[in-house]
Image (tube, helix red, strand yellow):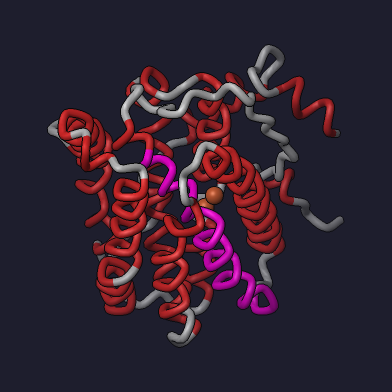
């Protein structure tokens, strides 16, 4: 019998986040600068996830292991649904006047540049970016910081996305290993992403800050920068873990996040989970 994504712990969940019309303008800590950082992240997920999926499914025919084939199917389906739901959140941000298309454009261009590289380099870049999303996801679920500061109406979407990023965190890497993981290629992938996607993401954030005239709010800017990468805040914690990818023997599963995943699977989709009803309605 053919294995399905759900059999290997990467179930595609058809969710449908309807955001209320009265969503406040600044959904993170009532701060414009930090909210626009979150909006930028949401803006770049659809082009990013599209690149991730394309770089992995290209190798689908070379996968003999039925478990890995099922994990690739789960990864692909989860990422496609993430993009769809972030598009919906992006529409809500757009309707509040944020120029989300402009926020996504620099990263979309950076990814077009990466897309001209040989396929091996593209999947190595994806493996590094999936390392970033997994570390971000783990921090978001493991610490109360995000949940305390984000508006309740958008919290579930981010928590669900974070859970699924952990569920599929090693899929890209394992596909990359089937074609022969090369350490120097991974080191180059880090440099390529840092030279293209990272500054493009900052440019997207800057575009939103200018467009929303946050430069006229110095107090908000100072507090927003502190909230995003001040001492002890989430981006600092995450960036500290990025160099793990450079280790010759790196593997995403070396860091066990299964207990955290299980806890959040129960909190979101267990018998009393906050998204269980929504999922049931769709099935
Ligand atoms: Fe995702
Ligand atoms: Fe992912």
Look at the image and tell me in which quarter the N terminus lies. bottom right
- Residue sticking out furthest to the top: 272
Look at the image and tell me in which quarter the C terminus lies. top right
Q: Describe residue 47's horizontal placement relative to residue 72 as left or right.
A: left
Nearest to the observer: residue 94 or residue 136: 94
Q: How many marks do you count on the picture?
A: 0
Q: Describe residue 278's horizontal placement relative to residue 135 as left or right.
A: right
Q: In x, y percent, where is residue 254?
A: 37, 48
**Viewer can see residue 193:** yes
Q: Above or below — where is 8 with respect to 225?
A: below
Q: Main secondary structure of the magenta part?
A: helix
Q: In x, y percent, where is residue 200?
A: 33, 64
* Residue drawn at 48 percent across, 80 percent down: 115
* Residue drawn at 41 percent across, 64 percent down: 107
**Viewer can see residue 143:** no
* Residue drawn at 47 percent across, 51 percent down: 99
Nearest to the observer: residue 243 or residue 31: 31
30 part of magenta stretch: no
Quadrant of the rendered structure where residue 135 is?
Answer: top left
* Residue drawn at 33 percent across, 23 percent down: 145
51 part of magenta stretch: yes
Q: In x, y percent, where is residue 4?
A: 77, 51
Q: Above or below — where is 73 with respect to 164?
A: below
Q: Please give the range of residues in magenta.
A: 36-62
């Amino acid at each position: 019998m053919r294995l399905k994504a759900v059999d290997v712990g990467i179930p595609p969940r058809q969710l449908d986040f309807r955001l209320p019309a009265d969503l406040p303008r600044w959904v993170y800590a009532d701060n414009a600068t930090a909210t626009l950082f979150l909006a930028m992240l949401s803006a770049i997920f659809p082009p990013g996830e599209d690149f991730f999926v394309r770089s992995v499914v290209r190798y689908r025919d070379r996968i003999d292991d039925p478990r890995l084939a099922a994990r690739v199917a789960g990864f692909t389906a989860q990422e496609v649904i993430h993009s769809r739901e972030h598009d919906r959140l992006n529409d809500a941000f757009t309707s509040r006047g944020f120029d989300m298309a402009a926020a996504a454009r620099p990263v979309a261009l950076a990814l077009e540049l990466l897309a001209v590289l040989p396929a091996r380099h593209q999947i190595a870049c994806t493996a590094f970016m999936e390392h970033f999303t997994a570390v971000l996801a783990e921090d978001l679920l493991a610490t109360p910081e995000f949940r305390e500061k984000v508006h309740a109406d958008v919290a579930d979407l981010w928590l669900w996305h974070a859970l699924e990023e952990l569920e599929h965190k090693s899929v890209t890497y394992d596909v990359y290993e089937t074609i022969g993981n090369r350490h120097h290629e991974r080191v180059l992938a880090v440099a390529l992403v840092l030279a293209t996607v990272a500054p493009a993401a900052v440019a997207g954030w800057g575009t939103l800050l200018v467009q929303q005239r946050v430069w006229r709010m110095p107090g908000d800017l100072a507090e927003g920068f502190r909230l995003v990468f001040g001492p002890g805040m989430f981006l600092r914690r995450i960036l500290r873990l990025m160099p793990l990818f450079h280790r010759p023997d790196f593997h995403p599963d070396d860091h066990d996040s299964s207990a955290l995943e299980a806890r959040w699977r129960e909190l979101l989709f267990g018998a009393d989970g906050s998204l269980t009803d929504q999922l049931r309605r769709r099935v």
